Image (cartoon, grey):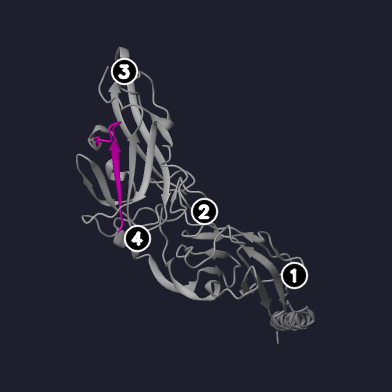
């Protein structure tokens, strides 16, 4: 055997012997590593111990659980739900049909049907907890007819947290919901749910009056947000109307530069000399997400009605009337802008 061939075999043997030694070492070290165990941390807690949602709208309490030393996956469960007097509260544990998003809403949907196709009915408790997240939810199907709102003292409940490493109970958490307020801005008292004034005010206004030679203030206009029962409307709709100081209709066409096609995320627009109506999917906005139809925060729909006119001296005086709002309850709704103290000046000076 030549010396070169002898050296090649020797190096090959050393290479494979080294690999085998490394493999044995890895196995040996792996056996000596401690096993990772699940754990329920003593310092875990709910950062929100009192929950005060508004009935009739879906409210998520996200990031309200400080996990501390708890490892995941873990399981959360509401247990021992009870009224303030200690009696059982089956209204919190029974399941009801609720509408759940199964696909992401993005504000670009082209029809009510497309929006509804992204939702489905599931049966869940009205006051719910994410099994593996700890997110607490009050679903929009909750109503004062089922759930006791303030001024009732409300409910107490416990949450069980468990994994293979142990179990822990968070006791005496509180649920004290408010009466339904089906729209915002609201004219209803948070405790009684009853109206405390006729209407609300617009969010923005830059309109000159016809007789008092001044720009109107928000208190010069009453905005009525209300559900209507009209035989000509079915499904879920939203109608906008404008009234002068004598409560006579103002033609929406006077707001000539309004982007009616993209005013709200609505469809099948019908515009007449007295109103503009859209088919919509409630709630409006559908979720808290900034879109072309919402405020920058995404939690309110945003409508802007505008027109152009020439003021004194030929200067542009662009009229604007705006409202940031939300409607949580399905049905046929209308938003009426009533000019109380003076009528808007549409014509040039």
First-in-chain label (3 vs 4)? 4
- For the point 37% across and 43% down, the residue is 224
The reply to whether residue 101 is visible in this rendering is no
* Residue that label 1 marks: 41
First-in-chain label (4 vs 2)? 4
335 in relation to 311, above or below:
below
First-in-chain label (2 vs 1)? 1
* Quadrant of image for the N terminus: bottom right
Total tally of numbered discs in the picture = 4
* Residue that label 3 marks: 311
Alpha carbon separation for disc pair 3 and 2: 47 Å
**Crowdedness near tag 4: few (<14), some (14–19) or many (≥20) residues, C-alpha within 10 Å:** many
173 in relation to 161, above or below:
above
**Segment colored magenta:** 236-250
- Residue in front for this viewpoint, 196 or 6: 196
Identify the image quadrant of residue 236: bottom left
Q: Nearer the viewer, mark 4 or mark 2?
A: 2
Q: Nearer the viewer, mark 3 or mark 2?
A: 2
Alpha carbon separation for disc pair 3 and 4: 43 Å
Where does the image place residue 325, in percent across and percent down from the top left?
42, 45
Give residue 192's mark.
2
Secondary structure beneath label 3: loop
* Quadrant of image for the C terminus: top left
Task: Classify residue 190 as left or right of residue 320.
Answer: right
- For the point 27% across and 50% down, the residue is 278
**Crowdedness near tag 1: few (<14), some (14–19) or many (≥20) residues, C-alpha within 10 Å:** some
Q: Is residue 317 magenta?
A: no
Alpha carbon separation for disc pair 2 and 1: 41 Å
Secondary structure beneath label 2: loop
Alpha carbon separation for disc pair 1 and 4: 42 Å
């Amino acid at each position: 055997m030549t010396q070169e061939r002898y050296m090649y075999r020797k190096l090959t043997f050393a290479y494979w012997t080294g690999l085998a030694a490394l493999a044995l070492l890895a196995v040996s070290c792996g056996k000596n590593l401690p096993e990772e165990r699940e754990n329920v941390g003593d310092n875990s807690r709910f950062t929100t111990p009192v929950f005060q949602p508004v009935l009739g709208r879906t409210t998520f309490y996200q990031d309200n659980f400080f996990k501390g030393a708890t490892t995941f996956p873990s399981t959360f469960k509401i247990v021992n739900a009870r009224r303030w007097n200690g009696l059982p509260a089956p209204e919190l544990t029974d399941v009801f049909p609720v509408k759940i998003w199964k696909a992401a809403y993005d504000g670009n949907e082209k029809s009510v049907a497309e929006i509804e196709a992204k939702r489905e009915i599931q049966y869940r408790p009205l006051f719910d907890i994410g099994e593996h997240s700890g997110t607490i939810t009050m679903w929009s199907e909750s109503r004062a007819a089922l759930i006791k709102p303030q001024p009732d003292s409300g409910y107490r409940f416990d949450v069980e947290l468990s994994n293979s490493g142990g179990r822990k109970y968070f006791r005496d958490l509180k649920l004290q919901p408010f009466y339904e307020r089906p729209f915002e801005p609201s004219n209803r008292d948070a405790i009684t749910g009853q109206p405390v004034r006729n209407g609300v005010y617009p969010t923005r206004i830059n309109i000159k009056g016809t007789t008092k030679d001044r720009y109107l203030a928000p208190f010069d206009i009453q905005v009525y947000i209300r559900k209507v029962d009209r035989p000509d409307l079915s499904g879920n709709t939203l109608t906008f109307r404008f009234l002068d100081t004598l409560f006579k209709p103002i033609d929406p066409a006077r707001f000539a530069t309004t982007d009616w096609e993209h005013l709200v995320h609505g469809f099948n627009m019908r515009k007449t000399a007295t109103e503009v109506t859209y088919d919509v999917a409630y709630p409006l906005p559908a979720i808290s997400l900034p879109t072309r139809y919402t405020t920058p925060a995404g939690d309110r729909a945003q409508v802007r009605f505008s027109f152009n006119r020439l003021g004194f001296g030929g200067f542009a005086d662009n009229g604007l009337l705006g409202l940031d709002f939300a409607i949580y309850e399905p049905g046929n709704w209308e938003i009426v802008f009533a000019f109380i103290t003076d009528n808007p000046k549409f014509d040039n000076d």
